[in-house]
Amino acid sequence: MFYLDFGAPEGDGLQYAMAAAMWTDRARRVAQVARNLLESRGKHTASPSRYDALVIGGGHNGLVAAAYLQKEGLKTAVLERRHVLGGAAVTEEIFPGFHFSRCSYLLSLLRPHIYADLELKKHGLKVHLRDPHAFTPMLEEGVGGGPPRSLILGSDRAENRREIGKFSQKDAEAFSGFVSYLEKLAAAIHPLLDAPPVDIPGITSGSWRKRLAAAKTLKPVVKCGLKLGRNIPDFYEITTAPIMKILNRWFESEPLIATLATDAVIGAMTSPSNPGSGYVLLHHVMGELEKEKGAWGYVEGGMGGVSKALANSARSYGADIFTEKDVEQVLVDSGGAAKGVALKDGTEIHSRIVLSNATPYVTFKNLTPQNALSPAFLKAVDQIDHTSPVTKINVAVNKLPNFLAAPTPDNKPGPHHQCSIHLNCESVDLLETAYKEAMNGRPSTRPMIEMTIPSVLDSTLAPSGCHVVSLFTQFTPFHIEGREWTEQDREAFADTVFNWVEQYAPGFKDSVVGRDVLTPPDLERIFGLTGGNIFHGSMSLDQLYLARPLPALSDYRTPIKGLYLCGSGSHPGGGVMGSPGWNAALTAMADLKRQ
C-alpha cells in the first residue's frame, strides 16, 4: 500500500508546486527510459537453453553464488522473477525522485573475503559509514527546563561514557568492557560463517576414507573454539540465554538496556526475555565495514547498490543475468536429479545443477515436483518457523524530523540523524508489551520503531531539501486475530506509527508526501519472503547451524540430487552477508568435481 500526498500547509504552495513540477519532469524521463528498455528487451532477455548452473532468484546470495560458479568456469545464469535485481537488497523509486532501500536498508554483515574476491568496490559498491550509530530519544518532561534526555552511542568511547553517564556512571564505566566482550564472541563466529556446518553423517558412517574427508569439516569448529578459549561458556550463554539475563548483569540504566535489547529482537518475533534473543544481538554485531568491527553503513544509491555491484562482478566473469524470468518448476529426471527449470511462460532451460535462492518453503512446496519428495520431508518443511514481526514503512518527506530531545529547527542534519533512531525503545517494558500484543494476534499499539534517514549521508536518494525515511517497525502478526490484513488495517497501523513518531518529532506528519507500507503478507507477496520473514526463516536456536533450515538440509544439498539451497534460509542465516551463496557454490562445485 502506498500513497502520494501533494497537499501543503498554507504558505508552502510555491515550494510544493516547484517540487511537483520537478517530480513530473522526472517521471517523464523515467518513463522514457522504461520505454527504451522495453523496446530493446527482446535483444537482451532471450536465454540459451542449456547451462552448467542455474540460480533461481537474483537476491544477493544468488548473485554471490553465480559469481563464484562462473569464476570457476561453470556457465551460469541467474533467473530473477521481478523486474529488478536484488531480492530484498533492492533500490526502488517508489515516488518520483525518491529512491528507497525498499526492504533491507543497512549494510554490515557482507563477508570481507566476498567483498575482496568479487572486487565489489571496483564494480561500484560505495558505502557511507555512520558514526554515531544509535540514537534513543525519550518521551519525558524536559530536565531542568531543557529538552528531554536522549542516548547517543558511537565509536568514540569517551563520548559514550558521557552519554551513558547521564543515566548511570556505573554503566558508563562498564560499557567499553561490554563492547569488548561482544567483539570477542562475534570474532570467534567468523570461521563458522565461511564454511558449511560439520558433516555429521560423513564422520559417523561410511569408509574410513570418507570419514577422514568429512572430519575436515570440523576445522572451522576447532578454529572457533581456539579463538574463544576460556570464553566458551560465555559464548554458550549468549547463544542460548535471554538477552535480559546478560544485560541485567552488566547494566542498571533502563535506556541503555532497552537500546541494546532492541538489537536482540530486531527482525525476530521474540522478546528480550525469551531464550535465544542473545544470539540475535550477537548476529547483529558480528559484521564489519572498511575493517571497522561492528560498523553499519548506508550503501550509496540504496541497497540495490550491493546487488548491482554483485551482478556487475558476475557478468564480468561471463554469467548471464535475467529479470522477469519467473520459474514455475525445477525439472527432475527419472533418476531423481535436477536437470534444469521450466519457466511460467513454458520455456525449459536445462543445466547440470540448480541453486535456489528462494526460501526453503518456496523451493520445496512451490518449485519442486511434490512427487519427487517424501511426505515426511514435506511435513518437516511445513514446520519450519517463518514467523515475522516486521512491517516496513518507506516514507518520502520534505524536511528532516526535528526531535524534541535534539532540536534542529534549521532543517540541517545533526549527528543523530545519521543513526538508527530507536523510538518507543526507552524501556524494556515497552518492547515486552508490543511483543505480547502481536503474539495475541494484534498489531502493537505502541510499536517498536527503528528509523533511519540514509539521505542524510547520501544525497543521491532524494530531491534537494527532501529525504527518504525508513521505518522498520515491530510487532505485527501475519494475520490479525486470524484474518487477512485489509487496506484499512494497513492505513490504521501506519497512522499509529506516524502518531508515535509525531510524539518524538512534532511536525513529522506534516512533512510526509508519500508512504509505502509493507506488512508481513506484503513482504511475502512482493519479495517472496515466506511469512514476511526477512531471514528466510526464524533465527531461533532450533533453526541455526546444524539445524538450518532443517537437520537434513544443513549442508545446502537437498533430497533432489543437483538441487542446492543458497539463500538466507541456509547456514549461517539472514542479513546481507553472502555466506550462504558462497558456501552453497563451493559445495556444488565440490560435488561436480567428484562426478
Image (cartoon, helix red, strand yellow):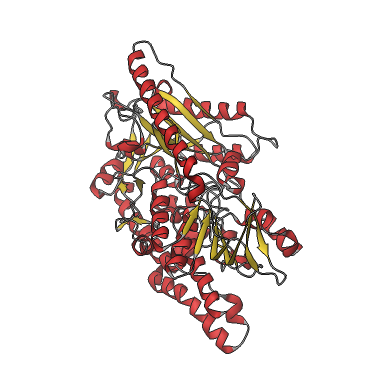
Return the residue found at the far top. 10
Please report the residue visible at 71 percent of the width from the left and 59 percent of the height from the top: 369
Q: How many marks?
A: 0
Near-viewer residue (317 or 123): 317
Please report the residue visible at 40 percent of the width from the left and 74 percent of the height from the top: 226
Instruction: Provide residue 366's location: percent of width, then percent of height.
Output: 67, 53
Instruction: Provide residue 145's location: percent of width, then percent of height.
Output: 29, 23
Near-viewer residue (242 or 523): 523
Instruction: Provide residue 361's location: percent of width, then percent of height.
Output: 64, 54
Q: Can you tell which quarter of the image residue 169 is in? A: top left
Please report the residue visible at 56 percent of the width from the left and 40 percent of the height from the top: 435
In the image, residue 11 sits, relative to residue 396, either above or below, namely above
Q: Is residue 572 visible?
A: no
In the image, residue 79 sits, relative to residue 582, either above or below, namely above
Q: Can you tell which quarter of the image residue 90 is in? A: top left
Q: Is residue 73 visible?
A: yes
In the image, residue 18 sits, relative to residue 277, either above or below, namely above
Q: Can you tell which quarter of the image residue 52 is in? A: bottom right
Instruction: Provide residue 97's location: percent of width, then percent of height.
Output: 38, 31
**Quarter holding the N terminus?**
top right
Q: Is residue 257 left or right of residue 359?
A: left
Return the residue found at the far left. 158
Q: Is residue 274 left or right of residue 143?
A: right
